């Protein structure tokens, strides 16, 4: 099974149609994993674009210019502006590196919010949502891999 959207889509289509001479084997968890990754991709794409909006000063007329804010705030914002968009592309392609970058971005946000709440406030609800998504990602990946055997 090849990486990327073409390999994943092809392998799912082949598995859904059934093995030669055998009965059709629906791959529900693989399909669920693909949809989960695509949904996360859309959310992380929006998150990355919102970080770029902060950098360019779009939609925040009462905020000081980006260049006048703390250097640590600038660094965190640029980090998430880049990693969120790259992770979103990888998630959409259903690639392994996309999941790894997404995990890095999500865990980074949780840790930065925990240790530096003045720079990156993370509410309890948001932290619970991130942890739930991370657990769902691991469970769906595990189930999809064990479904094939």
Image: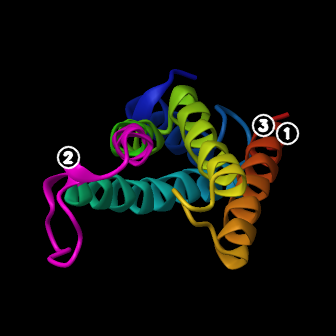
| Looking at the image, residue 117 lies above or below residue 7 | below
Q: What is the magenta range?
A: 55-79
| Looking at the image, residue 3 lies above or below residue 69 | above
Q: Earlier in the sequence, mark 2 or mark 3?
A: 2
User: Which residue is disc 1 drawn over?
Assistant: 146
Number of residues whose C-alpha sits closer than 10 Å to that of mark 2, classed few (under 14), some (14–19) or many (20 or more)? few
Q: Which residue appears at 64% of the width and 56% of the height?
A: 113
Q: Residue 70: percent from the left, percent from the top?
A: 37, 48
Can residue 77 be spotted in the picture? yes
Lateral position of residue 67 relative to residue 122, left or right: left
Which of 58/42 is in front?
58
Q: Which residue appears at 53% of the width and 52% of the height?
A: 37
Question: Are the two marked residues, 2 and 1, in contact with CB atoms closer than 8 angstroms?
Answer: no
Q: Residue 34: percent from the left, percent from the top?
A: 55, 51
Task: State the CA–CA distance, disc 3 to disc 1.
Answer: 4 Å
Lateral position of residue 13 relative to residue 145, left or right: left
User: For the residues carrying marks 2 and 1, which lies nearer the camera in this image?
Assistant: 2
Number of numbered discs visible in the structure rendering: 3
User: Which residue is disc 3 drawn over?
Assistant: 145
Q: Residue 73: percent from the left, percent from the top?
A: 41, 48
Task: State the CA–CA distance, disc 2 to disc 1.
Answer: 49 Å
Q: Secondary structure at mark 2?
A: helix
Give residue 55's mark: none
User: Which residue is disc 2 drawn over?
Assistant: 67
Q: Which residue appears at 22% of the width and 51% of the height?
A: 68
Task: State the CA–CA distance, disc 2 to disc 3.
Answer: 46 Å
Lateral position of residue 120 relative to residue 129, left or right: left
Is 62 one of the magenta-colored residues?
Answer: yes
């Amino acid at each position: 099974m090849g990486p990327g959207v073409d390999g994943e889509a092809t392998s799912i289509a082949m598995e859904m149609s059934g093995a030669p001479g055998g009965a059709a084997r629906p791959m529900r968890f693989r399909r669920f994993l693909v949809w989960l990754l695509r949904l996360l991709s859309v959310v992380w794409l929006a998150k990355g674009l919102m970080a770029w909006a902060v950098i360019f000063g779009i939609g925040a007329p009462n905020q000081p210019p980006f260049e006048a804010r703390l250097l640590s705030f600038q660094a965190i914002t640029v980090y998430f502006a880049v990693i969120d968009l790259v992770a979103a592309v990888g998630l959409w392609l259903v690639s392994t590196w996309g999941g790894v970058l997404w995990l890095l971005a999500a865990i980074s946000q949780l840790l930065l919010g925990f240790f530096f709440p003045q720079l990156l406030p993370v509410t309890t609800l948001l932290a619970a949502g991130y942890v739930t998504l991370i657990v769902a990602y691991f469970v769906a990946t595990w189930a999809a891999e064990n479904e094939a055997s």
